[in-house]
């Protein structure tokens, strides 16, 4: 099999510490209770009160006119580009952006769009790099339609785009006649870490969304927001892509619960990430990128252990994480405790000693 996820090997020990991704979270008892109590209706005809409430809250949170519930963040990105662009249009994004590296070529396959990768350290391109990439309108080149950023920058190490840079990028894009799109998969992590509100962080961006199935701990769902006209067009693509659902209030209730209970606690994940980075950096030969949010990237090659061997060794000890972009990525979330972080550091040290 190439594309189908392989079943879990029953010979491997059970996972005790899951650092693979913040998508690995499980609904808390309180969230499960909210799901069970959810008022539902037919979301496809606008008749699900729980979905409608969630969309109203996210639109207000992001300072936009309207919002729509989606099954996933990837569908938010795809529906956004399909709405903003026409076949043959060009999108500008960082070379490691999710829309390039993690969405299976959906934007080219479904929309016929060209995504031009922009370089820059830590998953971010500079305003000057963007300025240099914008070309005059010409029949010889594709129409440049959208500038996209990913907040936080995943492969860049969970780094936070500074508000000033975001504002300058918006100004450059608008002066060039381009729309702006914010992939906000971990936007609220950036907001909690900086103290800047989501409304301020996404100000000037024509479309923005937040994911509920990562650090916020919901089992499924994302909400994209923008102008009323933009969201009206997104609804057309939501239908075409199969994202228009029925009693989706069961899912939306979990997301609303997450907004009420799981936003401020993202700070705990950031603290655990810093503790993990600090512990790993004290092991000779391991290089660690200092985390800004809940992602910790490290490389054990200097300690005489390849990344692949370290991942395999930890898995045999009940710790799950993975290689990403040539480094090991560990992701903290609400199911990871401070004690688990201490144990993980101890296990890494044990593997290094045995190298």
Image (cartoon, rainbow, N blue to C red):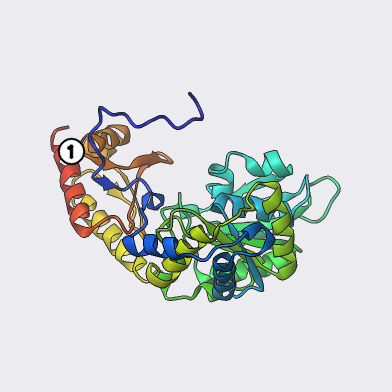
Seen from the viewer's position, the closer of residues 285 and 86 is 86
Residue that carries the numbered disc 1 in the rendered image: 352
Q: Which residue is drawn at the image coordinates 34% and 32% (left, top)?
A: 8
Residue 304 x/y as whole percent: 22, 34
What residue is shown at x 31% (from left), y 36% (from top)? 307
**141 to 246, vertically: above or below:** above
Q: Give percent across and percent down for residue 317.
A: 20, 38
Residue in the image at 70% along x and 58% along y: 235
Q: Position of residue 125 (x, y in %)?
A: 55, 56
Residue 172 can be seen, yes or no: yes
- Side of 78 where 313 appears, left or right: left
Looking at the image, residue 224 sits to the left or right of residue 151; the answer is right
The residue lying toward the viewer, choosing from 163 and 140, is 163
Quadrant in the rendering for residue 48: bottom right
- Quadrant where the C terminus is found in the figure: top left
The extreme right residue here reads 139
Residue 288: x and y in percent read 30, 50
Disc 1 is placed on an element classified as helix
Residue projecting furthest to the top: 1
Q: Is residue 126 visible?
A: no
């Amino acid at each position: 099999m190439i594309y189908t996820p392989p079943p879990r090997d029953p010979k491997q020990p059970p996972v005790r510490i899951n650092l693979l991704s913040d998508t690995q979270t499980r609904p808390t008892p309180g969230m499960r209770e909210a799901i069970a109590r959810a008022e539902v209706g037919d979301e496809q005809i606008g008749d699900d009160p729980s979905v409608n409430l969630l969309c109203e809250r996210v639109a207000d949170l992001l300072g936009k006119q309207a919002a729509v519930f989606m099954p996933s963040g990837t569908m938010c990105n795809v529906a956004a580009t399909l709405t903003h662009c026409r076949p043959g249009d060009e999108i500008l994004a960082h070379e490691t952006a999710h829309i390039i590296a993690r969405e299976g070529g959906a934007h080219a396959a479904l929309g016929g769009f060209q995504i031009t990768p922009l370089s820059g350290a830590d998953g971010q391109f500079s305003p000057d790099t963007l300025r240099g990439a914008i070309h005059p309108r010409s029949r010889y080149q594709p129409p440049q339609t959208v500038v996209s950023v990913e907040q936080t920058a995943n492969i860049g190490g969970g780094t936070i785009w500074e508000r000033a840079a975001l504002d300058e990028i918006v100004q450059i894009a608008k002066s060039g006649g381009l729309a702006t799109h914010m992939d906000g998969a971990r936007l609220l992590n950036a907001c909690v870490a900086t103290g800047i509100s989501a409304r301020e962080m996404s100000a000037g961006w024509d479309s923005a969304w937040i994911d509920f199935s990562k650090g916020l701990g919901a089992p499924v769902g994302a909400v994209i927001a923008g102008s009323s006209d933009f969201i009206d067009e997104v609804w057309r693509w939501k239908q075409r892509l199969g994202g228009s659902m029925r009693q989706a209030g069961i899912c939306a209730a979990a997301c609303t619960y997450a907004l009420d209970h799981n936003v401020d606690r993202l700070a705990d994940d950031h603290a655990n990430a810093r503790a993990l980075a600090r512990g790993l950096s004290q092991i000779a030969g391991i290089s660690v990128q200092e985390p800004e949010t809940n992602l910790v990237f490290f490389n054990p090659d200097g300690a005489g252990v390849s990344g692949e061997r370290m991942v395999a060794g930890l898995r045999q000890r009940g710790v799950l994480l993975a290689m990403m972009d040539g480094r090991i990525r560990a992701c903290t979330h609400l199911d990871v405790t401070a004690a688990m972080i201490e144990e993980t550091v101890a296990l890494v040290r044990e593997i290094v000693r045995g190298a």
